[in-house]
Image (cartoon, helix red, strand yellow):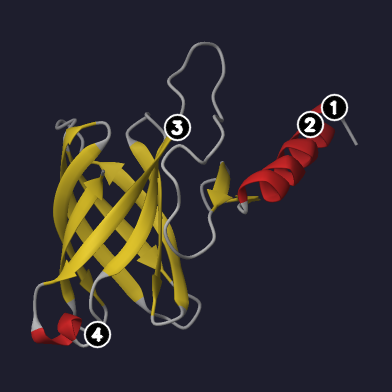
Amino acid sequence: MNRKTILAAALAASSLTLSGCYVMTGPDGQLWHVLPPGPSPVGSVPPLGAGGAPAPVALNVRMYPANDTATETGMLTGTVVNMMTGKGRFQLNYKGEVLTGEATRVDGDARRGVASAFGQSGTYMSCEYQMSNPKQGAGTCTLSNGAKYQAHIGS
């Protein structure tokens, strides 16, 4: 093993031990911090960047029902980790299924973005959002079963 692999393994182990999350390689080849289902404390994800780059920020997402299908399940909570690069990691628990994915800012507009998440049973969610600042925003999300939600990002 090379030095970077050993360091990555040590950081992953300390993340798992200290915060209840684990680190995995995402489909984009980047390291993802996967948080356990349920509410997570803001700032619980350790910084990934170095060299003075802004540290990632974990934000809570609250989703309120916006149609009858969503009302059957009620309010949902999730987490988005803003990587401060125009990308983020998105995760929520829907009826016991963990959906994970990403959030990406729309080119040419530093505030607007889209987010997508997918679960092992085939459930997926698509969202559009707008950030008022790096730690707060709002949007709409639709699940594959037609459930629609109003999303509130941040505290």
**What is the quadrant of the C terminus in the image?**
top left
Mark 1 and mark 2 residues within 8 Å of each other at the beta carbon: yes
Q: Earlier in the sequence, mark 2 or mark 3?
A: 2
Q: Earlier in the sequence, mark 3 or mark 1?
A: 1
The circle drawn on residue 3 is: 1
| Dot 3 amino acid type | Pro
Q: Residue at x 61, y 47 (%)?
A: 19
| Residue in front for this viewpoint, 2 or 131 | 131
Disc 1, SS: helix
Q: Residue at x 37, y 29 (%)?
A: 84
Please name the residue that numbered disc 2 is placed on: 7
| Residue in front for this viewpoint, 67 or 30 | 67
Is 20 situated above or below 106? below
Q: Residue at x 56, y 47 (%)?
A: 33
| Dot 1 amino acid type | Arg
| Dot 2 amino acid type | Leu
| Dot 4 amino acid type | Asn
Q: Is residue 11 left or right of residue 93?
A: right
Please name the residue that numbered disc 3 is placed on: 56
Q: Earlier in the sequence, mark 4 or mark 3?
A: 3
Disc 4, SS: loop
Q: Quadrant of residue 48?
A: top right
The circle drawn on residue 145 is: 4
Is 88 situated above or below 133? below
Q: Residue at x 51, y 47 (%)?
A: 28
Q: Earlier in the sequence, mark 4 or mark 1?
A: 1
Task: Using a 10 Å C-alpha cutoff, classify the residue at mark 4 as few (fewer than 14 neighbours), some (14 to 19) or many (20 or more).
Answer: few
Q: Nearer the viewer, mark 3 or mark 1?
A: 3
Q: Nearer the viewer, mark 1 or mark 2?
A: 2
